[in-house]
Image: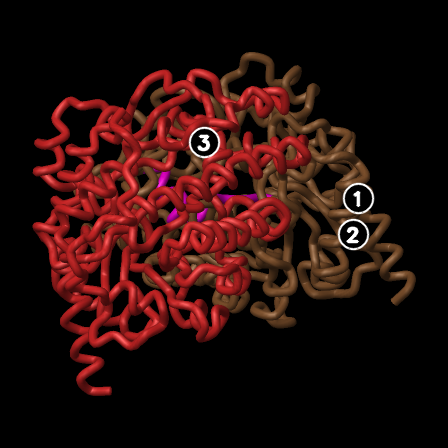
Chain colours: A red, B brown
Amino acid sequence: MAAPISPHTQIFAPLKNDLILRAAKGQKTERVPVWVMRQAGRYLPEYREAKGNTKFFATCKDPELVCELTLQPIRRFNLDAAIIFSDILVIPVALGLTVANDPGEGPVYADPISTPEDVKRLNTNFDIVSELGYVYEAITLTRVKLEGKVPLFGFTGAPWTLMKFMIENVSAGPNPNKARKFLVEHPEASHELLGILKDAVVRHLVHQIKAGAQIVQVFDSFAGELGPNLFSKFELPILRQIAREVKEQLKEMAIDPVPMVVFAKDAHFAIEDLAQSGYEVVGLDWCVQPLHARKLSGNHVTLQGNLDPVMLYATKDEIKKAVKDMLNKFGTQHYIANLGHGVLKDVDPDHLGVFVDAVHTYSEDINAVS
Amino acid sequence: MAAPISPHTQIFAPLKNDLILRAAKGQKTERVPVWVMRQAGRYLPEYREAKGNTKFFATCKDPELVCELTLQPIRRFNLDAAIIFSDILVIPVALGLTVANDPGEGPVYADPISTPEDVKRLNTNFDIVSELGYVYEAITLTRVKLEGKVPLFGFTGAPWTLMKFMIENVSAGPNPNKARKFLVEHPEASHELLGILKDAVVRHLVHQIKAGAQIVQVFDSFAGELGPNLFSKFELPILRQIAREVKEQLKEMAIDPVPMVVFAKDAHFAIEDLAQSGYEVVGLDWCVQPLHARKLSGNHVTLQGNLDPVMLYATKDEIKKAVKDMLNKFGTQHYIANLGHGVLKDVDPDHLGVFVDAVHTYSEDINAVS
């Protein structure tokens, strides 16, 4: 492992396209910025070629390869942000879980969390730069190679989502109530585990920002299944703490704050709370109606989302129509366009290009009229 | 197969507990009626004993065994309804799909739907009494053996949920975008398939009612993943047609109408529409906040739900507290208590008993005060 990098002292190229940062801060934008979740990935032939047979976790640990995978969609599409290629599951590994194998899209743990005692064996005092330095190296390298073309996103899984993976080994096949059962049967151990994960998530985000990430997203991919009661009790306070503590730690380190995005998939019941939880942007899945989200979230937050990912299987004309409808409903300000979940692996890349370009074209049209 | 039974001409025992029927019709009830989804099942030792090694589908086809499994929870708990033990997947089999094997909780098809051409090979002119007579026999038998203790529910899967199973073979492992992709890529074939399923569902419901079912539920277990756009286009019109056509066909046959319940899991975006779609009752999953649902659905519909099923893993005191909270929010009228999804297989039956009794006790308390 190379020596720790402190790139916040480096001088990166000036940013040529700050649309997404302005939108996140609620500043006026001349067109709607757009990026997509799971932007780098298997739907791109160049991804499959560059990755070859390298296993998923080995890929995440190779900064040169990560940089290449991150830049591929930026070369191909007119996107307004890059997002570092990585995985939400790097944190549990840093905490001491062992990756048993590498099937499908993500790792499976040899030693998942089953009991409150398992929480005690986590290595909470891990050296984050030793354990996750490969992420920060990749971010710095990518930031350099981006040459200011667009901002670079860092990201993390949210504590509840990480807890769910650590208990259920989601990649190995779903058991959608095991982690929820743990919350109800072991509330104290759950609070302890979520607190451990929260600390790790905060440190991971701060180090990504220090390494050069200009905006960060917290993926709470399984927020929805908590329902309003468990979400309020176990996850919302933790999400608030993450936003607050990241900002505090950056301040102490004299690093400029960056916009933070929370994407709590399927947590339709929590939109009001999320809009007041300290994040500049609230991401929405495709099941939330834009007008409903605007009404609930108020004007103090930027919304991000939310075209149904399966719409990229539709014809190009239908994609354009759907984008138009989405922009008409969200409006063009306080808004970052995205899919409502990750791009699917067998989508035609040209269809993603139509989506990206349609966001730009139609939002410029709307802005020109208004 | 025995000769068709026409039990609507039979005289069943008078109903001793009509709470759930009155609640469904919006009539005043002195206590809140309660039943639970997946009421008969593996959480009961007597179920595991009675079923033994009989395979799942063979169990569904054995009216005596179905009757026994349906009555078991009624003997053990103070429930206000029985629900016939069956499966939503009997309809695709009647349409010609072949059950390949019987793993886990349900069958897997040897010949799932993959292309629009596959829709053409469905046997739409099946004789429903030959194909599904075992369900109707079981209903009549159970209705007799219930001796009027509580009403008997019939049920069906909704067309979209059946379509998803037929395409994705859900029991074999999830592929949560394959059926959605089919909708977007093959809209015409999708409408055709959903229409075929709608016709089968209507016939199946009418025959269940004719056989003795006193209330019926349509399970749209995967409604939520459609999101508002695909749901409005492909499923909502079909759900409306089912309610209308069942009532029309019953009228033509001079059979009294029965209350109809629609449970569209995770379709939080559709509560207003569902409340006006011709069903007397709208079921809610655990992610919907009761007050929100009341506001959206208005006063003309009865709500059913929605305790988080994992709450049955909590202590008995916590279960009682959660029931109290739920009743305070829903109120005691226009309301049928239930879990927000099926009872989980490793729940302590005593905890389910606490839930059922708490609904009765607290709702009587509230009614006594008000």
Instruction: Name the amino acid, label 1.
Output: Lys
Q: Which residue is mark 2?
A: B324
- For image coordinates 41% across by 21% down, the residue present is A109
Taking the view exactly as shown, the residue that stands out farthest to the top is B53
Q: Secondary structure at mark 3?
A: helix
Q: Chain of mark 1?
A: B
Q: Is there a contact, CB below 8 Å, between mark 1 and mark 3?
A: no
Q: Secondary structure at mark 2?
A: helix
Q: Is there a contact, CB below 8 Å, between mark 2 and mark 1?
A: yes
Q: Secondary structure at mark 1?
A: helix
Q: Chain of mark 3?
A: A
User: Residue B228, how many percent across, how many down?
Assistant: 38, 61
Q: Which residue is mark 3?
A: A165
How far apart, in angstroms, are the residues tagged by discs 1 and 3? Answer: 30 Å
In front here: B237 or A97?
A97
Mark drawn on residue B320: 1
Magenta segment: B154-166
Would you say residue B115 is visible in this rendering? no
Instruction: Name the amino acid, label 3.
Output: Phe
Q: How would you rate the neighbour count of disc 2 (Cα within 10 Å): few for under 14, some for 14-19, many for 20 or more? A: some
In front here: A315 or A361?
A361
How many tags in the picture? 3
